[in-house]
Image (cartoon, grey):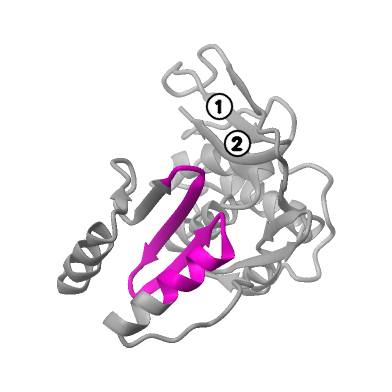
Amino acid sequence: MAWYSRINDYLLSLDFVRSPNKHTLYIREVEDDVMIISLYVDDLLVIGSKHDQVEEFKKSMHSEFERTDLGEMSYFLGMEIDQDADGIFVNQRKYASEVLKKFCMENCKPMDLPSVPNMKLSKSDEPEKVDEGLYKSLISYLLYLTATKPDIMYATSLLSRFMGQPTETHFKTAKRVLRYVKGSTDFGVRLRRSEDFKLVGFSDSDWAGSIDDMRSTSGYAFFLNCGAICWLSKK
């Protein structure tokens, strides 16, 4: 708490503004120059529209705090970042491989789709229950994979509804998602460099799709220059 208070006061003194929606995100805009700071515990990610601006900030940080400059970001919290002149590609290839190995699925047969089209699941699918802790662990890993894999967002969100009393059917369906992950470990999100920003959004909802309570499931995805930046699926 003391560290957050200290770094918060310091960034505010440099005219950064803290995001009202994410309190570890700071933004500073000076005319056409933009700098963004993302804070995670004692790690900072720095993004700026000008290289000189970023270097100046790093020097000011060095004079105020003991720090280590790890250079251009390539790996962070299980996410791999490839940067080139055309943009940024983010995926979780290494993390996905570790998940597959953890659940003894590293040699499984890949699937083309994460779930069966029009899949319906219920809390009362069958009386045979599975280990609740194991199921919760699997769903937690899958949910973290959705950070760069919007293609498994719907199936994982649906499966997360049954963490209280998972059945064999739920567990088999979750393992099918792992089989899809096996065949798509190289998939990720590509954010392309462009001078012309174009934001496109898609949204949809089923109607009373839940068998258990007749509630609907909605979802959306937003793309900036054809790169996915935001997605969600929830009941």
| Local SS, label 2 | helix
The mark that comes first in sequence, 1 or 2, is: 2
The residue shown at (51%, 43%) is 32
Q: Is residue 45 left or right of residue 64?
A: right
Q: Is residue 135 left or right of residue 80?
A: left
Q: Residues within 10 Å of mark 2 (few under 14, many from 20)?
A: some
Up the image or down, 179 lies above or below 118; here it is: below
* Residue 108 falls within the magenta-colored stretch: no
* Residue 57 falls within the magenta-colored stretch: yes
Up the image or down, 53 lies above or below 167; here it is: below
Q: Which residue is mark 1?
A: 219
Q: Is residue 5 left or right of residue 59?
A: left
**As shown in the figure, which amino acid type bears the numbered disc 1?**
Gly
The residue shown at (41%, 20%) is 213
Please tell me whether mark 1 or mark 2 is closer to you in this view. Answer: 1
Where is residue 100? Give x, y as percent. 68, 68
Which residue occupies the foreground of this view, 124 or 173? 173
Residue 22 visible at all: yes
Picture disc at residue 154: 2
Up the image or down, 62 lies above or below 12; here it is: below
Q: Which residues are magenta?
A: 30-58
